[in-house]
Amino acid sequence: MALAGNRILDFTRLGFGAQATLICGCLGADVIRVESTTRPDPIRVMPPYVPEPGRHGEGFGAATLANATAATSPNRGGIFYKYNTGGKRSITVDARHPEGLALLKRLVAEVDVVTESFAAGTLERWGLGYDVMAAIKPELVYVSMCGFGHEGPDTRHVTMGPTAQALTGLTFLTGLPDRAPSGWSFSYLDHVGGYLGAVAILCGLLHRRRSGAGQHIDVSQLEPATALSGAILLDALCNGRPARRPGFPTGNRRDHPPSAPGGAYRALGPDRWVVISCRTEGQWSALVEVLGRPDWAGDPRFATLAGRVEHADDLDRHLEAWTRTLDRYEVMDLLQGAGVPAGAVQDAADRLERDPQLAARGHFTMLGNDEVAPLPLEGLPVRMSATPPRTGGLFDRGPPCLGQDNEQVLGELLGLSADEVAALAADGALS
Amino acid sequence: MREDPPGQAPLAGVRVLECADPSVEYGGRLLAGLGADVVKAEPPEGCESRHSGPFVDDAPGPDRCLAFWADNVGKRSVVPADDAELAGLCTRADVVLHSLGPAEAARRGLGFDALHRARPELIVCALTPFGQSGPWADYLADDLVLMALGGSMAACGYGPGPDGDYDTPPLACMGDQAWRTAATYAAIAVLAALAWRDDGGTGQFIDVSAHECSASMTEWHLMTYLCSGAVHRRGPHPTLTAADGRLVAALNPDFLGPHVFAGMLAMLEAEGVAGPLSDPQFADPGYRSANYREVWRALKRLAALHDGEALYRLGQGAGLPWGVIRSPEEVVEDRHLRARGHFVALEHPELDRSVTYPGAPFLAHGSPWVMTRRPPRLGEHTAEVRAEWSAAPGAR
């Protein structure tokens, strides 16, 4: 695998940082999560909980007795399983314990990369700031990932995905015209921030290979997002056409390049939708053929793309009268078969159970651990011919139970015997 | 704080040939920012993204397209005489980024086997809507189709009415987010392939399916379904309306610990709007949850006192992850991003203007982001690239 031989000491928690090391793990890096038994990663103990084999657990956010029981284990938090594939290992070390801090310093000497997603200043308070780590290992690549980064006037600000989405324009760009934005209902920027965190790790490793030098790379959750508004930002800055204007954003309609029909249309069934998008005359003609050349399609107003754009509301009404009589996948297959871009609006269940493309591409890998039966989990969704990424990472395994690798990692990297590890644990250093 | 001395860009000397529709351009832009020499091979009339609006000053022209500018800053442009010259350029590159299926790639002389035979060190990355294989491999997609199939749309939009039915559709964020996600994954895979090649490996073929990349998002939604059988239903996050009408995303993550509510309460009391929340019963999470309406009422009283930007800063001062909802152009004014030197103005001398672009996606003082070259005019660098790329690059 591409990053085999690279070792990452990984202090990340929650989604943003863990997404970055997940990617590196799938590329073959040995990712060693450093965790705490007293302050576990919140997503280890948050619902939804992975159920006992064959049973359903409880829904997200529900505070029930069953959840309280499940929460006694740090290995059942469902979201942890989303962000911690890639064969990550887990050790528990208490940085506030003198022996624990000493162990962490010895581990820094044995790794290529340190990653963390704490508030700025946390590692310094432990006595493990960048200057300390760089003195131990000058060629260390240190990648910090936190909301506002480590430099600038507002480094004390805290973010979750929706915070960063609001501040960077991405919430604004999701909504129907002349209404408050709906925004995203998940933390898109936890993912995107993590992608750029992975780019930062690779950037540091490639730079070190050429120069021999380590460095600190400071990833915030804001900067990875600013280029995502593309031409919309430049239109405001160059043409004085602000995005905050009547009629904008435009819902699912896209002006550049224009498509008509273009949008989500109701299909058969409750809250079922299918997206259709025609940009060319060829696609429009093909759509009309699939529809069986209805009279309305011959309306002169719909004869050109410009006309279809101008009269899109009428066009959409006619088209939806057809789509709502059919299953969304049937619409999709009929239109795609004729060369018209179309796609069912799929939810999580659809991706797992209905999507034949994800299944054929092996998108999901069944992985579990000592406590959790195998689940279909995701990894790095690209194919590489010479160095295939693996969702189970270097060791072909599922997300780790808390602290399950203490003995192995400390033995392998630092030469500690099982007795020495047991003594450290008894002393409280491994908590 | 220790600051690393500036060194060379990590991809200095790496040649990338980009021969692609708009879908992969953002990935090429990332590689250019890391210092690669990214050359865009275009047909004589210019690539697709030069022909769609908006245009600078609303005057159409292949060198005036803002979508092209946004995703091609830092690159060079060549117009090869024919496919044979294009294939020749590919064999003198380190990386080829394209957006072709297997048949089209072979027809144009860009099939991986042929390129690999000519130059075993070459890394070829194809980003297509559904990847090179599978039952949907020949299906067509734009960003909206990918956002639908990937699950983002099902999760985004307005909530249902009182009857539980939705009267508005699932929504996709503007700005081609699925393509950008896929292009970012393409850049990640290329970087990993370069690192492996540096360590003694060969070139290889990278197959990126935008659909799979798009399907890898949505945070906890797959896990919720796997754990509970429940499907996430769409609806917005709660917002507060500030005195100036601006909206503030007001997240109050109680799950992170009792300090979250303690910080909020101190803020509300200092502002004189805490009302019943000062009752010690509200310190109990169960009681608070059962009476959350009172929490929200107090926050609304606070919001009425302040403009949006001030309300955002007030919440942050109390340790809450609040953010004012900004339009893209309002982001440029952010003092923190300005202090980090994020936005970069590049001269466009032929238009006698300077244009501000989003810059480095992270701060790497030891290998600074490269942001010096404005987007290329069509074919601007044909002659110089022909001369410079007349032989394969030296070993790195």
Image (tube, coloured by chain):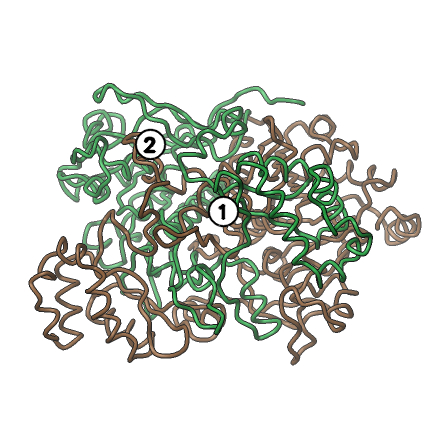
Marks 1 and 2 sit apart, C-alpha to C-alpha, by 20 Å
In front of the other: B363 or A298: A298
The residue to which callout 1 is attached is: A192
In front of the other: B126 or A146: A146
Location of residue A272 with respect to B315 vertically, above or below: below
> Can you tell which quarter of the image residue A132 is in?
top right
Instruction: Give left or right: position of A383 versus A391.
Output: left
Instruction: Give left or right: position of A143 versus A224.
Output: right
Residue A95 drawn at (x, y percent): 81, 41
Q: Chain of mark 1?
A: A
Q: Residues within 10 Å of mark 2 (few under 14, many from 20)?
A: many
Q: What's the residue type where badge 1 is placed?
A: Val
The green-tinted chain is: B
The residue to which callout 2 is attached is: B73
Residue B261 visible in the shown view: yes
In front of the other: B225 or A318: A318
Location of residue B375 with respect to B239 vertically, above or below: above
Query: Which mark, by number, is residue B105?
Result: none
Residue at the (89%, 53%) spot, across then down: A422
Q: Chain of mark 2?
A: B
Q: What's the residue type where badge 2 is placed?
A: Val
What SS does tag 1 mark? helix
Instruction: Give left or right: position of A386 versus A64.
Output: left
